[in-house]
């Protein structure tokens, strides 16, 4: 088990919410491939997306949205960051900010001070599956495991249902 996976398990355990960690073939870690191969619904899959303001000193946030939704980057996210322009952080920036690679980014074990915004639609699910810190692990449990995190904030309208 990697150091990041151990940190993720420590953090999710500390929430006190029951969960399951599941091994994952790293080649199947991306949401659509994972759900199809392992039999999960996209409705229950939540992605953690790092966003960054544009400019000399970028400001970052991590956003958790259902796989069936689109993050409102140019509306809600931009306003919340207080920035003129915001974009998805590229994979290398995401790795620098979180210590995690795309396909494994999770709300658990993020750096202190990084805001964590959870779309309210995520909290309406019975169960969700999120990254486990690496492409080799996923975390499955009630969305309450997310709201138990000290840096978490549930945001109404953070994402919209994809068409």
Image (cartoon, rainbow, N blue to C red):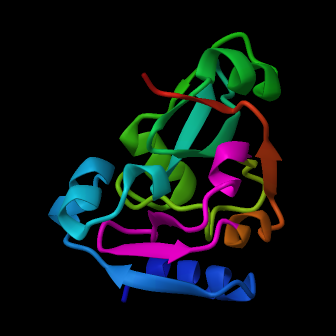
Q: How many marks?
A: 0
x 45%, y 60%: residue: 100
**Residue 79 appears at what percent x and percent y?**
79, 20
Is residue 129 among what the camera can see? yes
Tell me: residue 75, above or below residue 146: above
Q: Nearer the viewer, residue 58 or 143?
A: 143
Q: Residue 36: horizontal and vertical position, in percent? A: 21, 57
Residue visible at 75% across and 88% down? 16
Q: Quadrant of the N terminus?
A: bottom left
Quadrant in the picture for the C terminus: top left
**Residue 111 versus residue 59 in the image, above or below:** below
The x and y percentages for residue 161 are 53, 29
Residue that appears at 63% across and 44% down: 63
Front residue of 22/85: it is: 22
79 horizontally vs 4: left or right = right
Q: Quadrant of residue 18?
A: bottom right
Most distant residue in the top direction: 84
Location of residue 144 with respect to 43 vertically, above or below = below
Residue 82 location, quadrant? top right
Q: Residue at x 66, y 65 (%)?
A: 143
Q: Would you say residue 117 sits in the magenta stretch?
A: no
Residue 137 sits inside the magenta stretch = yes
Magenta residues, start to end: 118-143
Left or right, residue 125 beside residue 133: right
Question: How far across and how far down the image is residue 130, in percent?
Answer: 48, 63
Between residue 103 and residue 155, name the one nearer to us: 155
Q: Nearer the viewer, residue 72 or 60?
A: 72
The answer, for residue 54, to whether it is visible in the render is no
């Amino acid at each position: 088990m990697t150091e990041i996976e151990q940190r993720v398990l420590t953090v999710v355990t500390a929430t006190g919410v029951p969960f399951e960690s599941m091994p994952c073939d790293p080649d199947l870690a991306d949401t659509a491939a994972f759900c199809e191969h392992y039999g999960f619904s996209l409705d229950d899959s939540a992605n953690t997306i790092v966003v960054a303001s544009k400019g000399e000193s970028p400001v970052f946030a991590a956003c958790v949205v259902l796989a069936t939704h689109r993050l409102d980057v140019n509306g809600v996210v931009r306003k919340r960051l207080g920035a003129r322009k915001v974009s998805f952080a590229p994979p290398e920036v995401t790795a620098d900010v979180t210590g995690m690679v795309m396909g494994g980014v999770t709300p658990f074990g993020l750096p202190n001070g990084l805001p964590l915004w959870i779309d309210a639609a995520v909290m309406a699910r019975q169960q969700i599956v999120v990254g486990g810190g690496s492409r080799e692990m996923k975390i499955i449990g009630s969305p309450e495991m997310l709201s138990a995190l000290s840096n978490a904030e549930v945001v109404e309208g953070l994402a919209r249902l994809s068409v």
